[in-house]
Amino acid sequence: MSSRSIPRFLTVSFVCSLLLLAAAVVFAYLASPLRDSTFQANSANAGTLTPWLQGMGEEDWLLGATVLATLLATNLTLVLYQWKPFQIANLSSYWQQGWPRGAAQFMGCILWLAIWALLLGGFWFGLFVYLLNQWLLD
């Protein structure tokens, strides 16, 4: 792959993951018991009332949210890593300050892992709250 096609691929991948997020949000909305006029929100009665989705438990909804959040966080982290304003300053400035080359690269790796972890937590929490609001989770 050329260096020019990598950002385009990452951008297309991120857009596809956003479309997948939109589809998942619509699917959860359509499966929500709140769409049934006879549903009364009480504790321990969450879950879909759609007959063909009765076998889906809370762990399945949480697994879907975790996979989707991981996909979004990974794609967005890679897009930000390739985007010029977010690229780490020239590592030679760290070397001039006395940092060993490996230490500067390690710190950059830790920084991007922290960004990924924060994005993962944020996306997962957002999806979790959405599923709670749709009464698909207790």
Image: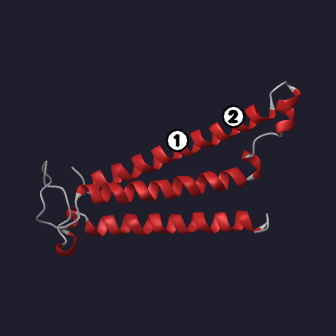
Q: Position of residue 96 (x, y in %)?
A: 89, 28
Q: The residue under label 2 is which amino acid type?
A: Met
Q: Quadrant of the N terminus?
A: bottom right
Is there any visible trace of residue 64 in the rendered image?
Answer: yes
Is residue 38 positioned above or below 112 on the image? below
Q: Position of residue 57 (x, y in %)?
A: 22, 59
Is residue 136 positioned above or below 16 on the image? above
Q: Position of residue 115 (x, y in %)?
A: 59, 42
* Residue at image coords 86%, 33%: 93
From the image, tell me which residue sits under label 1.
118
Would you identify the image quadrant in which residue 102 lies?
top right
Label 1 Cα crowd, 10 Å radius (few <14 / some 14-19 / many 20+): few
Is there any visible trace of residue 135 in the rendered image?
Answer: no
User: Which mark's residue is nearer the viewer, 1 or 2?
Assistant: 2
Q: Is residue 64 left or right of residue 10?
A: left
Q: Is residue 35 left or right of residue 21?
A: left
Q: Is residue 11 left or right of residue 28?
A: right
What colouring method underlies this structural image?
Answer: secondary structure
From the image, tell me which residue sits under label 2.
107
Would you identify the image quadrant in which residue 46 lies?
bottom left
Q: Position of residue 108 (x, y in %)?
A: 70, 38
In front here: 105 or 23? 105
In front here: 32 or 65? 65
Q: The residue under label 1 is which amino acid type?
A: Leu
CB of mark 1 within 8 Å of CB of mark 2? no
Q: Is residue 25 left or right of residue 113?
A: left
Q: Quick one: SS at disc 2?
A: helix
* Residue at image coords 52%, 65%: 17
Q: Quick one: SS at disc 1?
A: helix
